[in-house]
Amino acid sequence: MQKEILSFEVVNQEFGIDVDYVEMVIEKEEITPVPNSRVFIEGVVNLRGRIVPVFDLTKILDLEVPEDIVFDSIIIMKHEKEEIGILVNKVNNVISFDDEELDVLPAKSGKFVGKVNGVLKINNRLIVYLNLEKLFESLETK
């Protein structure tokens, strides 16, 4: 079965999410911090009068962040009827693939366990295909 993902980069790693979740991509704008919020919430943005929380994927996936890293974009997604944003360094493109092109991660692959559908190898690119349902479930315990 053919699937489509939006590919993007966070701290020199390429990730992908199902296009069905993606509403839009916006340039990073001013993010208002929310006092006493969870560690992975960067803050909120005002999106045409709607307040949208912005998550930091580096904190969710426990990625090391170089000091000079710049987040240029926010991917706005819909999850369980709620809008959320994730900070990304760069949005690449939409990729179509078949299920058999997806490699499963080994059970001991650390921080990605239980948060990904697998890995795609396309040309010389290695794209971690995130499972948003499991990723958000994991946040409930953080």
Image: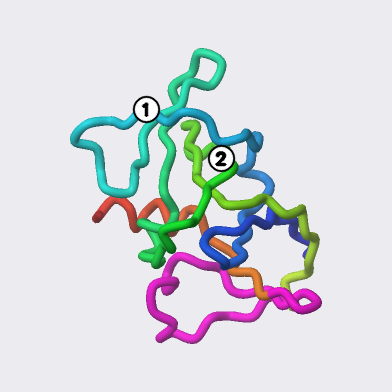
Relative to 22, does residue 92 appear above or below in the rendering?
below
Relative to 83, does residue 8 appear above or below in the rendering?
below
Q: Image quadrant for the C terminus? A: bottom left
Q: Secondary structure at mark 1?
A: loop
Query: What colouring does the structure picture have?
Result: rainbow
- Residues at marks 2 and 1 touching, judged by CB atoms closer than 8 Å: no
Relative to 19, does residue 30 appear above or below in the rendering?
above
In the foreground, 78 or 89: 89
- What is the residue that sits farthest to the top in this orientation? 49
Residue found 64% across the figure and 69% down from its top: 127
> Which one is earlier in the sequence, the residue at label 2 or at label 1?
1
- What is the residue that sits farthest to the front in this orientation? 68
In the foreground, 107 or 24: 24
Image mark count: 2
Answer with the quarter of the image where residue 16 lies.
Answer: bottom right
Task: Report the side of 6 relative to 98 (left or right).
Answer: left
Task: Report the side of 139 relative to 131 (left or right).
Answer: left
Mark 1 surroundings within 10 Å by alpha-carbon count, few (fewer than 14), some (14 through 19), many (20 or more): few
Q: Secondary structure at mark 2?
A: strand
In the foreground, 12 or 131: 12
- The picture places residue 24, in percent across and down from the top left corner, at 66, 35
Q: What range of the chain is rendered magenta? A: 101-125
Q: Which residue is mark 1?
A: 32
Residue 126 lies in the magenta-colored region:
no
Q: Which residue is mark 2?
A: 74
Residue found 51% across the figure and 67% down from its top: 116
Answer with the quarter of the image where residue 98 lies.
Answer: bottom right
Q: What kind of residue is marked 2? A: Ile
Q: What kind of residue is marked 1? A: Thr
Residue 120 lies in the magenta-colored region:
yes
